[in-house]
């Protein structure tokens, strides 16, 4: 009789521990997904700021620099540099498309410098902005899919639990003669 009580207590403790572990994994993965969503939103905002800052700088670059507009041009350069830097800082350089996006960002900065030297970069800039937009959409879509599907640990836990519950139900159904 005492042995049955011990096995039941140990079994209950194991079940409670497993449930606690599952709760911990789900909570952690939920928080990770929240942070990833915030990162996606921040990256999207930074990319749009960078594209608009570069476009504005292209327009301003055609102005003749004099005492009246020198500060405005300097401020436009600061905005371009800051916005491009924010995008770069949010990229994960381990991922190939992030590295490609980083290359396009650096190319944008070089192109704008050429434009401020008087070179006509309009066509090249438009193509580059289209490339940045297309690649950014690809990166953001993949990251959104990752948020939507859950992190790898969450997926593994979810499918593992489905399998365990399925096997337990089969064992119960065939073991009890149903």
Image (spheres, rainbow, N blue to C red):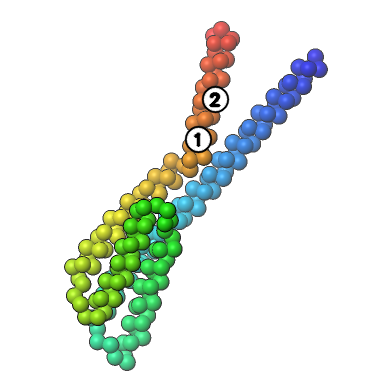
Residue of label 1? 156
**Position of residue 163 in the picture relative to residue 72 (left or right):** right
The reply to whether residue 54 is in sight is no
Q: Is residue 164 above or below residue 1?
A: below
Marks 2 and 1 close (CB-CB < 8 Å): no
Q: Secondary structure at mark 2?
A: helix
Residue at the image point whose x is 30% and y is 72% from the top: 110
**Quarter of the image holding residue 126?**
bottom left
**Position of residue 60 in the picture relative to residue 12 (left or right):** left
Residue at the image point whose x is 35% and y is 73% from the top: 80
Q: Is residue 109 above or below residue 147?
A: below
User: Alpha-carbon neighbours of circle 2 within 10 Å: few (<14), some, or many (≥20)?
Assistant: few
Q: Is residue 31 above or below residue 48?
A: above
Q: Position of residue 70 (x, y in %)?
A: 33, 87
Label ID, residue 75? none
Q: How many marks?
A: 2
Q: Residue lying farthest top?
A: 177
The quadrant the N terminus occupies is top right
Residue of label 2? 164
């Amino acid at each position: 009789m005492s042995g049955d009580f011990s096995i039941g207590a140990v079994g209950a403790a194991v079940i409670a521990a497993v449930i606690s572990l599952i709760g911990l994994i789900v909570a952690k993965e939920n928080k990770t997904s929240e942070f990833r969503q915030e990162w996606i939103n921040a990256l999207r905002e930074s990319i749009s700021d960078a594209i608009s800052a570069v476009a504005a700088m292209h327009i301003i670059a055609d102005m003749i620099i004099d005492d009246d507009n020198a500060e405005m041009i300097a401020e436009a350069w600061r905005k371009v540099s800051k916005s491009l830097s924010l995008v770069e800082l949010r990229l994960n350089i381990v991922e190939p498309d992030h590295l490609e996006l980083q290359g396009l960002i650096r190319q944008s900065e070089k192109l704008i410098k050429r434009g401020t030297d008087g070179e006509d970069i309009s066509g090249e800039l438009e193509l580059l902005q289209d490339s940045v937009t297309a690649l950014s959409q690809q990166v953001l879509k993949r990251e959104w899919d990752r948020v939507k599907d859950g992190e790898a640990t969450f997926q593994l836990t979810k499918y593992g639990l489905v399998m365990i519950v399925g096997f337990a139900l089969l064992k119960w159904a065939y073991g009890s003669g149903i």
